[in-house]
Amino acid sequence: AEDGIRDIGVTGVQTCALPILDWSTATEINTRDFRVMHSTDGTRWNEIGSVPAAGNSQSTLNYRFIHTSPADGQNTYQLLQRDIDGRSEYSRVVKVILGKGESGLFVYTNPVEDHQIRVQLKTGATITLYNSIGAEVYRQAAPMGTHTLILPNLPAGTYRLRAGKETLPLIIQ
């Protein structure tokens, strides 16, 4: 058998203002990793991350990469799959469009992991978290920029995270 992967598919979607790339492989033979390439114009590409591959597999495997610092407007992605022997292959190109200047609130990770979330604000705001019945369970003022917030130990459920006039759903498992 040849080195590489068989039947790679890649998709890109925007969830809670962050592009999420999902892809799967039907089989893998001597696969090293997947380099995630990003472009805002479709011609100049930069590597923004890497995801280790299984190496060898005869079953379908699913992979995910979340771009935590996307550009406003067009974000174009392509995977470079690399084999252990140095061979490589590009995936198809996918585009995710983010509203220019519309969203000032980006949240990662959602669902919440280890009681922590990263919040990116385009302007300073008070960040407030509400439970399913509308009661405030967390509040913190934050300036413009990216912040890691440590949330209290909250029961699993869907919450609303508000910063300024924007509100996003937040899932705690």
Image (cartoon, grey):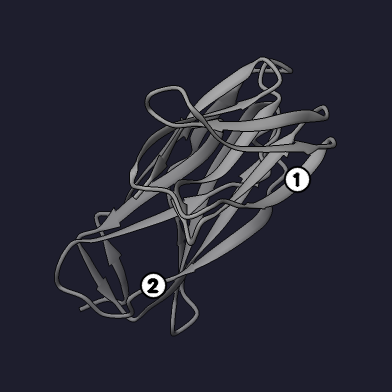
Q: Which quadrant holds the N terminus? A: bottom left
Image spot of residue 63 (x, y percent): 36, 58
Number of the label disc, if any, that sits on residue 146: 1
Callout 2, which amino acid? Ala
Helix or strand or loop: what does disc 2 sit on? Answer: loop
Mark 2 — residue?
A: 53
Q: Is residue 123 left or right of residue 102?
A: right
Circles 1, 2 touching at the beta carbon (< 8 Å): no
- Which image quarter: residue 123? top right
119 vs 95, nearest the viewer: 119
Image spot of residue 16 (x, y percent): 50, 31
Q: Is residue 31 above or below residue 124?
A: below
Q: Please report the residue visible at 53 percent of the width from the left and 52 percent of the height from the top.
A: 152
- Which image quarter: residue 60? bottom left
Q: Is residue 162 above or below residue 39?
A: above
Q: Is residue 90 left or right of residue 133?
A: right
* Mark 1 or 2, closer to the camera: 1
Q: Please report the residue visible at 66 percent of the width from the left and 21 percent of the height from the top.
A: 103
- Looking at marks 1 and 2 on the same chain, the residue that comes earlier in the sequence is marked by 2
Q: CA distance from mark 1 to mark 2?
A: 29 Å
